[in-house]
Image (cartoon, rainbow, N blue to C red):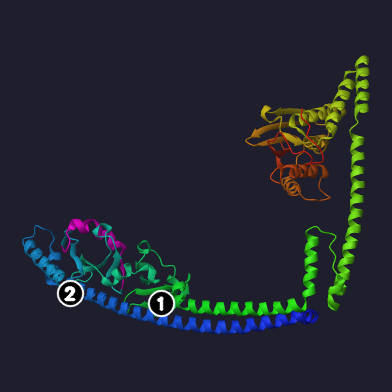
Amino acid sequence: MEKWREKISCWKFDRKMQALITIALIITTLIFFVVSTVSSVTSLKSKTEEMLQAKNDTMAENFQSTLERYKSLAVAMVLDNSIQRYLECNSKQDKNYSLVAMEAKNVMSSCQNMHSDMNFIAVVSYQMDDYLYRGKSGLVETDFQKTYRKDYQKAKNVQKGSIKAGFTNAYFKGKKYTLNVYFPVYNVQAISSERGLLCMSFSSSLLEQVLKEQEDSGQMTALVDTEGMIVAARQMDEIGTDARYANQLNGMQGSFNQDGRLYIYQKVSNWDYYIVSSISSSELYKPSIRTIGLMTLVLVALVAISLNIVKQVIRKIYKPLDNVVQKMDDVAAGSLTARIDEEHMGEDFVKLATGFNSMMEEILVLMQQVKLEQHQIEQIRFNSLQSQIQPHFLYNTLDCIHWQAVADGNQEISILVKALARYYRICLSKGHDVIPLKMEVEHVQNYLIIQNMRYDNIIGSSIQVEENCKDAMIPKLTIQPLVENSIYHGIKIKEGKQGSISLSAVRKGETVQILIADTGTGMTKEQIAEMNQHLSEYDEGFGYGVRNVNKRIELLYGKEYGLHYVKNESGGVTVEITLPYVTNVEPGILQGDIINV
């Protein structure tokens, strides 16, 4: 806090006034905005909760009344003497079967006629493996025979006891949803003896209302059982699935927010169901959007007016500062001759104008010095390059040694000198930094000749380069340092044992992959991982040559190309070089041109 006070105390008067007016206006407007918004939203939310709760109470009472009516009907049918006598029959061959079945059907028909919302009623006999059916629709349309067993197994106990119910589209071949009630029929003389099953299907107006609820209202209602499964919902694909908010349903009623919606729930008394109504936050707060928008516009307008007033005051009082800014813009555009007229700056800004003019004079002096130093550096670089591009004396000398060795019959010296001459010819490459792959391979071959003569032919080699990638351009001295690493750090330290190096190059689409594998002592996985990690980083403990090779490839072609080390099957190391297949590279990228052969 003390540090902030020190900073503010250093501000000029105009800045303090601007900050004071702006902050005061913003705080006042924000307080009004927050208080009004919170009050409006709280009131609206409370009214919406009351409305949804009233709706849920009504639906819960209606559904409870409906379920109680269905239960009473089921109990009455189960205890009916005609139904009991029908279920006592062991076979259709019983002498009184026809009479008993007719009486049971009459009772079922009367029941069906008395309840307009009943789709069908059926009594299944376990002893005869048969059933009696009465309904508004035929067996073919309801597909009762094939459906009732599966639907009964899926139905859940909705109250303490044996009554089960489910709201599904199992019947009527999936064309409509019905409330299906199942009640086991026991022998009234022996309750433990289950004789059959009473099946009733109803068209529930309450559940159909849930299915047909309009989506554009923003409100949604669902019937959820106490285990969290959705029994009825407007989104039919959700029926039979677990509700995401199931763990929030506790007690008889309540509310909660989840997934951007406000949920109000009410339990159906004495039944294992919840009526859950919800509304999206966007619809809930929609009536308040106009008020919030108006208050936002007021806030923006007040802030804009405040800033404009402060801006006008600053412009009049500190108009000389604009002159300084314009001159700085001129300098940014490249006009180094821009100067400020100190006579019209006023007492407050005359020192600023004097300092600006002095700074520009110093910049001009420094630029002249930089130009002179740059010219000197370019001259030194030119002289350095000039000293490298005259190799004829070296070539002629090596040629004389070669012919003298031939004349003396010393074949080894002749081969060595020829390889050395070709080696340095490619090293110099007339000052070029990027050469064709075939020249780089020739350079490696000459290098291996020299090293084998030096180390008594302990290095075997295999070189396989496909024709379609020999013209690919590669930075000079890319492969040779890697071969040198394989010799000095892999093969040479094997205490006199021979080793081999294989070099291969293949073209894969628009890229060229070069593999250099050795049979040396190899490295651990940790060492290889560390090497790959430090390829593009500066680390004094990491090999300069390898990092130099990788960095030149990245500078020339991009970071997606370069080196990668892996452990090979022979125990040595394989380095993979990935390059783009290009036969022409823009000159000057690596301080040199391309040599074409």
Q: Is residue 485 magenta?
A: no
Q: CA distance from mark 2 to mark 1?
A: 36 Å
User: Sequence-wise, which precedes: disc 2 or disc 1?
Assistant: 2
Magenta-tinted stretch: 134-158
Question: Would you place residue 575 above or below residue 331 in this image?
Answer: above
Quarter of the figure that contains the C terminus: top right
- Locate residue 393: give its quadrant: top right
Which class describes the residues within 10 Å of circle 1: few (<14), some (14-19), or many (20+)?
Answer: many
The residue that mark 1 highlights is: 264
Q: Position of residue 337 (x, y in %)?
A: 85, 60
The residue that mark 2 highlights is: 76
Q: Position of residue 426 (x, y in %)?
A: 83, 30
Q: Are marks 2 and 1 in contact (CB under 8 Å)?
A: no
Question: Would you place residue 411 above or below residue 364 in this image?
Answer: above
> Is 352 displayed left or right of 277 in the figure?
right
Q: Residue at x 30, y 70 (%)?
A: 209
The answer to which of 513 and 188 lies nearer the viewer is: 513
- Locate residue 504: give its quadrant: top right
Tell me if I can see residue 125 in this picture: yes
Tell me if I can see residue 188 in this picture: no
Question: Would you place residue 328 above or below residue 302 in this image?
Answer: above
Which SS class for mark 1?
A: strand
- The amino acid at mark 2 is Ala
Q: Residue at x 17, y 74 (%)?
A: 76
Judged by depth in the image, the label closer to the viewer, 2 or 1, is 1
Q: Residue at x 91, y 18 (%)?
A: 403
> Is 447 displayed left or right of 104 in the figure?
right
Q: Position of residue 193 (x, y in %)?
A: 21, 67
Q: Position of residue 351 (x, y in %)?
A: 87, 73
Q: Is residue 142 magenta?
A: yes
Quarter of the figure that contains the N terminus: bottom right
